Amino acid sequence: MSEVVSEQEEKELFVRAYSAMVLGRTLDKKIMTAQRQGRVGFYVPSMGGQEATQAGLGMALRPEDRVFQYYRDITLMIYRGVDIDIILNQIFGNARDLAKGGGRCRAT
């Protein structure tokens, strides 16, 4: 983080990153459970522990930077503000999936 930010802004940034990490890991576990139940066709977990890398990348990017995410980028997607419904629609490949059930790559 090269820009100068206040102590409060810095705290909010880290809270946002931590929240994305916790939610990302929680979703990862829930989606793996759904896959084991046969409700998700394809899913590879983030392999717990990579959440900080994804959140850190999100912190380093500018809002105008484009990211082409893939299925292991749930934490990054959350940090970048992608709605959870969009993420889940893509994973489940349902009719509301932006790729119309055809894939998970999305630019934000």
Image (cartoon, helix red, strand yellow):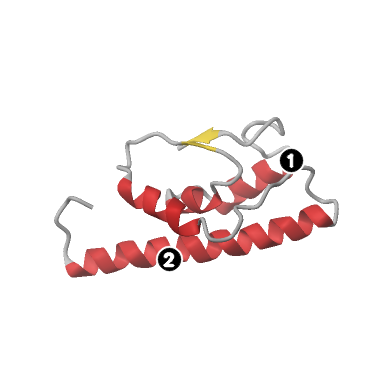
Looking at marks 2 and 1 on the same chain, the residue that comes earlier in the sequence is marked by 2
| Count of number-bearing discs | 2
Give the residue drawn at x 66%, y 38%.
97
Q: Position of residue 19 (x, y in %)?
A: 46, 65
Tag 1 residue: 94
Q: Residue at x 31, y 61 (%)?
A: 13
**For the point 67% across and 62% down, which residue is it?**
29
Q: Which image quarter: residue 104? A: top right
| Numbered tag placed on residue 65 in the rendering | none
Within 10 Å of disc 2 (Cα), the crowding (few <14, some 14-19, many 20+) is some
Left or right of 66 in this view: 102: right
Q: Mark 2 points at which residue?
A: 18
Residue type highlighted by circle 1: Asn
Q: Which of 45 and 75 is in front in this view?
A: 45
The percent coordinates of residue 108 (x first, y second) are 45, 38
Examine the rendered structure and indicate whether residue 18 appears above or below residue 40: below
Q: Between marks 2 and 1, how big is the CA–CA gap?
A: 29 Å
In the image, residue 57 lies at what x, y percent? 38, 48
Q: Which residue is drawn at 65% across and 41% down?
A: 90
Tag 2, which secondary structure? helix
Q: Residue lying farthest left? A: 4
